[in-house]
Structure formats: C-alpha cells, structure tokens
Image: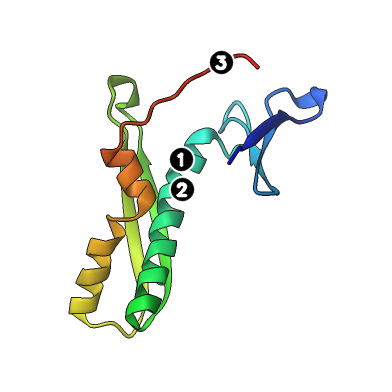
Amino acid sequence: MTITIRANPPENALRYTATAEGHGMPLGFSQPDGDGPDPHDYFDGALGGCKALTLMWYARRKQLPLVSVDVDVVRDAAEERHGVYKLTARLTLNGDLTQAQRAELLAVADKCPIHRLMTTTDVQITTELA
C-alpha cells in the first residue's frame, strides 16, 4: 500500500493532505506554527485506533458484551529529543463486563498490531528521491 502526501495550494506551503485508500487526511504543523493535525497526532492516533478496533474485533469473536471502546492517547514528548517518547492509552470499556473480562480486554489491548509494531519491531526506513 502507498500513502501519498501532497502539498495543498501554494498559498499555504505548510499544509498537506495525506491520502490512504482514497481517504484524505489533513496534515500540517501543530500550534503555534500551524493548525494541525501534525504527524505526531497520526502516530499517536494510530495506536489508539488500533487498540479500539482490536478490542471490538476480539470481543465480537469471543462474544463478550463490549458495546464500544473509547481511547484517550496522552502524549509526553518532553524527552523525545533524548530518545524517549511516552504514550499512555486510557481505555474506557463500555458494556456490562465482569472484572475478569475487563482484565482480559486490557491484556488484549497491548497485543494490537500497532502497539507491537511500535514496541517490538525493527522498523527500517529508506528515504530516496523519486
């Protein structure tokens, strides 16, 4: 799959649109240089979205009474320049769940593909001129 990133009209050189599977996503800088969302927002959002989707898929497969999942991803980038980027995913599990089911879903949340990609995979990036 290829995600395209294209500049918006020339009057706003710091605004871009990323397109994935036919869906456009605005991309820019966060405040004060722009009005975002910035690339960090998409990185963080990918984690939260993956956790929510993974939990819903798992709950349906296991026939757990999970109605929906709300995720708040809290970023602490204070030490990013020193190689530490901290994310906290706060899950709200909506549904008539037992404590055991809630614990099971919490364990599953850390197995979502993006969590694993961010924490256990050697991501190799090549940058080249077209």
Residue 2 image-quadrant placement: top right
Q: Which residue is mark 3?
A: 128
Q: Nearer the viewer, residue 49 or 78?
A: 49
Q: Residue at x 26, y 40 (%)?
A: 120
Please give left or right for residue 48 compared with residue 13 in the image: left
Q: Which residue is mark 2?
A: 46
Q: Residue furthest top?
A: 129
For the residues marked 3 and 2, what is the alpha-carbon distance in whole angstroms? 25 Å
Residue count near mark 3 (Cα–Cα under 10 Å), binned few <14, some 14–19, many ≥20: few
| Residue type of the residue flagged with mark 2 | Ala
For the residues marked 1 and 2, what is the alpha-carbon distance in whole angstroms? 5 Å
Residue 97, given in percent of the width and then of the height, sits at: 28, 82
Q: Nearer the viewer, residue 114 or 67?
A: 114
User: In terms of secondary structure, where does tag 1 sit?
Assistant: helix
Residue 36 image-quadrant placement: top right
Q: Residue at x 28, y 55 (%)?
A: 111
Mark 3 or mark 2, whichever is nearer to me:
3
Residue 29, given in percent of the width and then of the height, sits at: 58, 30
Mark 3 or mark 1, whichever is nearer to me:
3
Q: Which residue is mark 1?
A: 43
Which is nearer the N-term, disc 3 or disc 1? 1
Whether pointer 1 and pointer 2 mark residues with C-beta atoms closer than 8 Å, the reply is yes
Which is nearer the N-term, disc 3 or disc 2? 2
| Residue type of the residue flagged with mark 3 | Glu
Task: State the count of labels.
Answer: 3
Q: Nearer the viewer, residue 75 or 104?
A: 104
- Relative height, residue 13 to residue 26 (above, below): above
Q: Residue at x 27, y 29 (%)?
A: 84
Q: Nearer the viewer, residue 40 or 54?
A: 54
- Relative height, residue 96 to residue 17 (above, below): below
Residue count near mark 2 (Cα–Cα under 10 Å), binned few <14, some 14–19, many ≥20: some
Whether pointer 3 and pointer 1 mark residues with C-beta atoms closer than 8 Å, the reply is no
